[in-house]
Amino acid sequence: MKYAIAKVLFWLTGWKLDASPELIARAKNTVTLAAPHTSNWDTFYSLGGFWLMRLPVKFLIKDFYMKWYFFGFFKWLGGIRVSRKQRTNLVETSAEILRTTNVNLMISGEGTRNRVEKWKTGFYHIAHNAEVDISLGYLDYEKKQAGLLEVLKVEDMETTFSKVEKLYSSVKGKFPEKYNPKIY
């Protein structure tokens, strides 16, 4: 059903999936960066891309969206409740999800739709702790493409971040002025 929904969404909006079968196979059970993240529409196109690639996906979402009056909609999409009021070990909890399930954990590197001075680095620590790769999911609104840029092995932080920055350098978000491609 999700695959059919994604097909219709992409067809109606003129979007295309850009991911080779080899990259899709390598992207299974990884931390998946979703960037740039500048609009609420990013969630739907990102999920649509995963559904078209037939990759099971979970993503972190504010606990507000998991309230009863959303009737489980965000849980059905793959949302995992995150409370910003409580200090939890989100990195270790997320790493445990990756170690015990066969899903991709989609994370926005910026952590918000607004412009930030530097990215959150939790995606790196989650991948490192779970001993999984990092797949680079992207949305390019200029080209109307969603897909995968690359799947990276986790190396030291500086090397990994440098590769991520370079690969995302030409991707255009919906609101480019809200995107800072510098990780640190």
Image: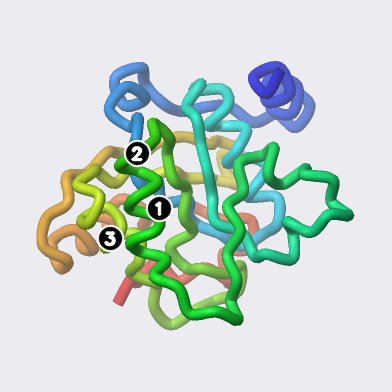
Q: Earlier in the sequence, mark 1 or mark 2?
A: 2
Q: Which residue is drawn at the image coordinates 42% and 66% (left, top)?
A: 90
Q: Which residue is drawn at the image coordinates 27% and 39% (left, top)?
A: 151
> Within 10 angstroms of label 2, few (less than 14), some, or many (20 or more) residues?
few
Q: Quadrant of the N terminus?
A: top right
List the residue tagged with mark 3: 124
Q: Which residue is drawn at the image coordinates 58% and 71% (left, top)?
A: 178
Q: Nearer the viewer, residue 159 or 177?
A: 159
Q: Disc 3 and disc 1: Cα gap in Å?
A: 21 Å
Q: Which residue is drawn at the image coordinates 47% and 48% (left, top)?
A: 106
Work out whether 56 lies above or below 133: above
List the residue tagged with mark 1: 170
Would residue 81 be found to the left or right of residue 171 on screen?
Answer: right
Q: Nearer the viewer, residue 118 or 176?
A: 118
Residue 182, by quadrant, is: bottom left
Work out whether 162 lies above or below 172: below
Q: Quadrant of the C terminus?
A: bottom left
List the residue tagged with mark 2: 100
Residue type at mark 3 is Tyr
Of helix, strand and loop, which one carries label 3? helix
Residue 153, by quadrant, is: top left
